Image (tube, grey):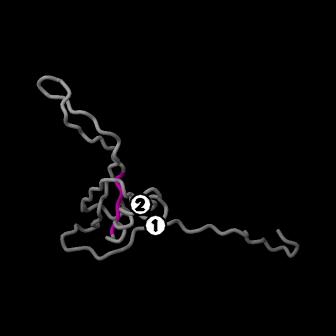
Amino acid sequence: MSKTGLAEAPKETTSAPKTMYVEMEQDEGVARGHVRVTEVIAYDFVKNEPIRDELTGKLTDRMRKIEKSRGPYFYQDGEDFVTFKENNPKSRIETFGIQMLKSTAIKFINRPENIEQFTKGDK
């Protein structure tokens, strides 16, 4: 409390949480209370592994690529996908168009780890 009897306001302000979800008009085919989003799964190369013959159990000359998946991540705007690809240049990327409840979409899209993948310059 100050000498004038009035309470002092805090000197620091808290910033609003980052959000990525935006309200968009939905197509006719989207169920009421749902929104259309795109799910992204990124696969990172781990190693090549030799393939064994199923009958003999012996190693063959062929190799299998082993990958580790990351995600799922979610976005609404195609520009976000461009940023995602720039942030993950060595990853193999799969996308799926899906419908989900609006409340669930907001929760998933606004997760900090999701926003990080679609923010320029963070990777």
What residue sits right under mark 2 in the picture? 87
* Residue 103 place in picture, x, y as percent: 36, 62
Residue at left offset 18%, top offset 31%: 60
Q: Are marks 1 and 2 in contact (CB under 8 Å)?
A: yes
Q: Is residue 19 magenta?
A: no
For mark 2, give the secondary structure.
helix
Q: Residue at x 77, y 71 (%)?
A: 8
Find residue 44 and report its horizontal and vertical position in percent: 35, 48
Q: Which mark is residue 48?
A: none
Give the magenta-colored segment's residue range. Answer: 71-76
Which picture quadrant has residue 49?
top left
Which disc number belongs to residue 120? 1
Q: Is residue 5 above or below residue 116?
A: below
Question: Badge 1, how many Cα within 10 Å: few under 14, some, many 20+?
Answer: few
The quarter of the rendered structure image containing the N terminus is bottom right
Tell me the quarter of the picture where residue 32 sits. bottom left
Residue 120 x, y percent position in the rendering: 46, 66
Say which of 107 and 85 sits in front: 85
Q: Judge by depth and name the residue closer to the eye, 68 or 1.
A: 68
Quick check: 122 above or below 60? below
In the picture as drawn, the residue positioned furthest to the right comes out as 3
Q: Amino acid at mark 1?
A: Lys
Residue 73 drawn in magenta: yes
Q: Residue at coordinates 19% horizontally, 36% vertically from top-left?
A: 62
- The kind of residue on which mark 2 rests is Asn
